[in-house]
């Protein structure tokens, strides 16, 4: 008899997974990108944070509505299947498993190691940094694939830990800023010496900060393991999204109280250390930076959760490469071990790509690689997923006749407009980089078509 995934997670764990997966490194290292894109205008920067947050809330509400009606093994793939059909669900699942999950997880491992390198005084991008990130990836795999219950406990703990620096900055930084006048000054004028043209303006800021909000959809991958999932998953998505938006807005506002906007925008990846050192002193800043490293690892842990279950969600449908192999669930760990191994492999590929093609080529300019190999894997795949939501929202309006007009038409329509807006922002801000990314995306999807065609024509997938 086939081993099934057990109901092991409650509402608190699900909320912590939404908050924990979303909140991580993005808010720390994308803050300067947003300010640079908006010319140092704090008002526009907060507007950027709010716009992306509103889009996340709208889309999560629509999927929360679907979650009350359908639950199987992987939320987004389930929703694609019940609305569009098995073929569309397969390609969505293939994209998630081969490109989306590994891209975000690999990048998070690299960024987690980056902050750890800064903490220990190691050179960013050096051999020690790269080895440390690879170690983080392997640890994430071991925790999720071999001890899923431990992974859930770590997610709850990491969520509580990572909220400490954000809430501390939101409260203490804002109070300090109102006293010293920096917060008022931040809204009076844009930072001098900054140009919006280089960062794509507010549209570029929206695309960049989408990374900081991304990950909530990954929480739907545990709906088959969530107790009373049709009630608890919608609650977790809605409450978790609202918490994240409020925390992010508070963090940005708090930053204005400890550093001038010009210094915030120029700080780069060193912003968290400078900001918290200014607020708490050298020792306090270092302690908070340790917490930030833990929070980044918590986000990577949540993303690895999606990687481990990615190909499994296709295999249980009899689709993709070797479904008999990748649908196996280990009777001891109750986890899809083969799917987890493939997920780790894909993460490793993206991790190596990030170091060689993006960091060494675009940031340092030391490698002579063509431009079409150096698009940003931490942002553009996210916009692709928003594009994939659009057919689901459209068909939902057409078919879900049992829903109220607000849930059936108003929110899915707002979701459609939100996704279109995100796609527009990506092409406006990235232009040729977006085209180069689409070339890689087409190659990945062609590979998925090959396995799907092999299955239909009677080839031996396993």
Image (cartoon, helix red, strand yellow):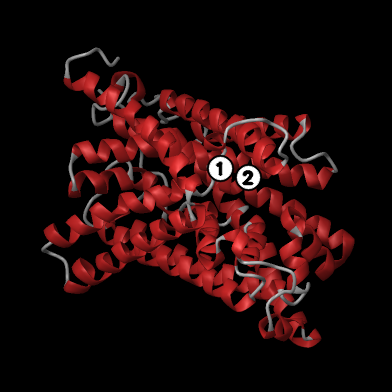
User: Which mark identifies residue 241?
Assistant: none
Q: Do the residues labelled 2 and 1 touch (CB within 8 Å)?
A: yes
Q: Is residue 330 visible?
A: yes
For label 2, count other residues whose C-alpha is less than 10 Å away and answer few (under 14), some (14-19) or many (20+).
many
Extreme residue in the top direction:
460
- Report the front residue among 46 and 371: 371
Image quarter for residue 301? Answer: top right
- Report the front residue among 7 and 352: 352
Residue 398 falls left or right of residue 35: left
Residue 373 falls left or right of residue 25: left
The C terminus: image quadrant: top left
Q: How far apart are the two marked residues, 2 and 1, measured between alpha carbons?
A: 6 Å
Q: Can residue 309 be seen in this view?
A: no
Instruction: Give the residue displayed 64% in from the left and 76% down from the top.
Output: 42
Residue pointed to by mark 2: 297
**Label 2: which secondary element:** helix
For label 1, count other residues whose C-alpha is less than 10 Å away and answer few (under 14), some (14-19) or many (20+).
many
Instruction: Give the residue displayed 33% in from the left and 42% down from the top.
Output: 74
The N terminus: image quadrant: top left
Instruction: Give the residue displayed 61% in from the left and 66% down from the top.
Output: 196
Placement of 84 over or under 52, stated as above or below: above
Looking at the picture, how far across and down is residue 325, in whole percent? 34, 19
Residue 200 falls left or right of residue 180: left
Image quarter for residue 441? Answer: top left
Looking at the picture, how far across and down is residue 95, in whole percent? 37, 37
Looking at the picture, how far across and down is residue 233, in whole percent? 35, 56
**Label 1: which secondary element:** helix
Placement of 411 over or under 11, stated as above or below: below
Q: Tell how many labels.
A: 2
Instruction: Give the residue displayed 19% in from the left and 50% down from the top.
Output: 83
Residue pointed to by mark 1: 301
């Amino acid at each position: 008899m086939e081993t099934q995934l057990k109901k092991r997670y409650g509402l608190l764990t699900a909320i912590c997974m939404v908050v924990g997966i979303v909140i991580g490194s993005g808010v720390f290292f994308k803050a300067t990108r947003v300010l640079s894109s908006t010319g140092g205008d704090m008002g526009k920067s907060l507007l950027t944070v709010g716009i992306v947050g509103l889009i996340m809330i709208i889309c999560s509400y629509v999927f929360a509505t679907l979650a009350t009606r359908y639950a199987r093994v992987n939320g987004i793939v389930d929703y694609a299947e019940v609305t569009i059909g098995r073929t569309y669900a397969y390609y969505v699942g293939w994209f998630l498993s081969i490109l989306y999950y590994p891209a975000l997880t690999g990048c998070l491992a690299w960024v987690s190691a980056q902050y750890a390198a800064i903490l220990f005084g190691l050179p960013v991008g050096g051999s020690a940094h790269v080895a440390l990130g690879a170690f983080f990836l392997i640890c994430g795999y071991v925790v999720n694939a071999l001890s899923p219950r431990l992974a859930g406990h770590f997610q709850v703990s990491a969520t509580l830990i990572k909220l400490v620096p954000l809430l501390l900055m939101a409260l203490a930084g804002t109070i300090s800023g109102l006293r010293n006048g920096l917060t008022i000054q931040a809204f009076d004028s844009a930072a001098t010496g900054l140009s919006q043209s280089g960062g794509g303006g507010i549209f570029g800021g929206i695309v960049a900060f989408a990374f900081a909000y991304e990950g909530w959809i990954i929480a739907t991958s545990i709906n088959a393991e969530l107790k009373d999932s049709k009630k608890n998953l919608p609650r977790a998505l809605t409450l978790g999204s609202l918490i994240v938006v409020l925390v992010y807005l508070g963090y940005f506002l708090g930053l204005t109280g400890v550093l001038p906007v010009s210094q915030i925008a120029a700080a780069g990846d060193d912003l968290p250390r400078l900001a918290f050192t200014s607020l708490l002193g050298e020792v306090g800043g270092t302690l908070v930076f340790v917490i930030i490293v833990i929070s980044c690892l918590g986000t990577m842990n949540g993303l690895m959760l999606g990687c481990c279950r990615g190909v499994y969600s296709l295999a249980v449908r009899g689709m993709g490469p070797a479904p008999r192999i990748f649908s196996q669930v280990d009777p001891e760990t109750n986890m899809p071990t083969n799917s987890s191994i493939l997920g780790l492999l894909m993460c490793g590929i993206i991790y190596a790509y990030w170091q060689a093609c993006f960091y060494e080529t675009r940031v340092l300019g030391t490698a002579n690689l063509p431009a079409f190999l150096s698009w940003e894997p931490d942002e553009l795949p996210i916009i692709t997923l928003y594009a994939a939501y659009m057919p689901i929202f459209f068909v939902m309006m057409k078919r879900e006749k049992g829903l109220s007009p607000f849930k059936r038409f108003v929110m899915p329509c707002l979701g459609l407009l939100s996704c279109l807006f995100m796609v527009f922002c990506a092409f406006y801000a990235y232009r040729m980089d977006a085209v180069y990314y689409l070339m890689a995306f087409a190659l990945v999807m062609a590979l998925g078509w090959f396995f799907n065609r092999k299955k239909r024509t009677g080839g031996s997938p396993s």
